Image (cartoon, grey):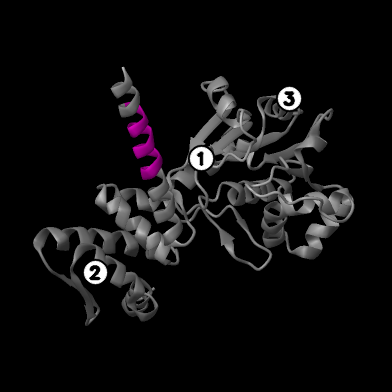
Amino acid sequence: MDHMDQASALFGSFDENIRLIENEYHVSVISRDGEIKVSGEPEDVEHAVRAVNSLLALLSRGETLTQQNVRYCISLVNEGAEEKVQALAGDCICITSKGKPIKPRTLGQKHYCNAIRKNTITIGVGPAGTGKTYLAVAMAVTAFRAQQVSRIILTRPAVEAGEKLGFLPGDLQQKVDPYLRPLHDALFDMLGPETYQRYVERGSIEVAPLAYMRGRTLDDSFIILDEAQNTTPEQMKMFLTRLGFNSRMVITGDITQIDLPDGKHSGLKQVMRILRGVEDIAQVEFTARDVVRHKLVQEIVKAYEKYEEAKKNHGKDSSHDRK
């Protein structure tokens, strides 16, 4: 990539990438005669230059800049950890049916993908938008294409998210389909509808409610349990004991979004305590910084975390006052 192309890619369409850096550090960034010049207060300029250099390093390794990875670079620079940006380059998990590469976009996502590669069971926990399910499905498709497993099984508990859906029309499969739609969508994206349908008919791919797993032993399979925060402890134990030979399991969930009826305990919260430290079982916890959806999703997650923390502290203060 020559200097002009690099500068163009760095600045982005309508200079949107550089504007993020200028707004963050209150500097001015211009490209002139093949050079990038940054002006402002010395400390701000230093931070901005580090951010620009980390983005140029990504570009030199064939990465495409997006607002998400520009913001992520900025957050790493602010922590003095911009050298870690290099770790994100070049790690393609799989290619979608439309030819788009799927890659980890944050260090948390990279750690998660490595954990899935190295362990028989991986538990990925974190807020919405961190790619827990999507990356797990991508890893499953990769293992399936490489013939490391002979089938993919995706499951989730059929629990309503705060709404009563009532009596849905149709047969049993049609009734549970709305719960499983996010899993279908991820597979459609990676395989294309025709290939996906062919594998489903062949029995190589199964998307089913958790209740369908009872009494089975799942050999030679890549099994993903999604929305695991909505399992009861009994369901979680039932699921884990389905593990067969040459199989891999990924369990994903968000313990801040439990939709179980009052009085029911989450199997995910319990299993994280029970299995902590067990060999060949990894636990990966995502944070708001790993959110790769619209930037407002990240802000919403942070706001909720702050609110929950304040509520917890207020509760402690109240109980202290009562003593």
**Kind of residue sitting beneath label 3:** Thr
- Relative height, residue 289 to residue 279 (above, below): below
Query: Which-is-in-front pick, marks 2 and 1?
Result: 1
Question: Counting residues from the N terminus, which is met first, the one under dot 2 or under dot 1?
Answer: 2
Q: Give the label on residue 256, or none.
A: 1
**Distance of mark 2 from mark 3, alpha carbons?**
53 Å
Which of the two labelled residues, at mark 2 and mark 3, occupies the earlier sequence position? 2
Left or right, residue 14 beside residue 172 = left
Tell which residue pokes out farthest to the front in this image: 322
Q: Which residues are magenta?
A: 306-316
Q: Earlier in the sequence, mark 1 or mark 3?
A: 3
Circle 2 sits on which residue? 22
**Residue at (78%, 53%) from the top-left corner?**
177
Q: Residues within 10 Å of mark 2 (few under 14, many from 20)?
A: some
Horizontal side, residue 212 vs residue 321: left or right? right
Name which residue lies at 22% across and 82% down: 33
Q: What secondary structure characterizes most of the magenta part?
A: helix
Q: Position of residue 77 (x, y in %)?
A: 27, 53
Classify residue 277 as left or right of residue 251: left
* Amino acid under disc 1: Thr
Quick one: SS at disc 2? helix
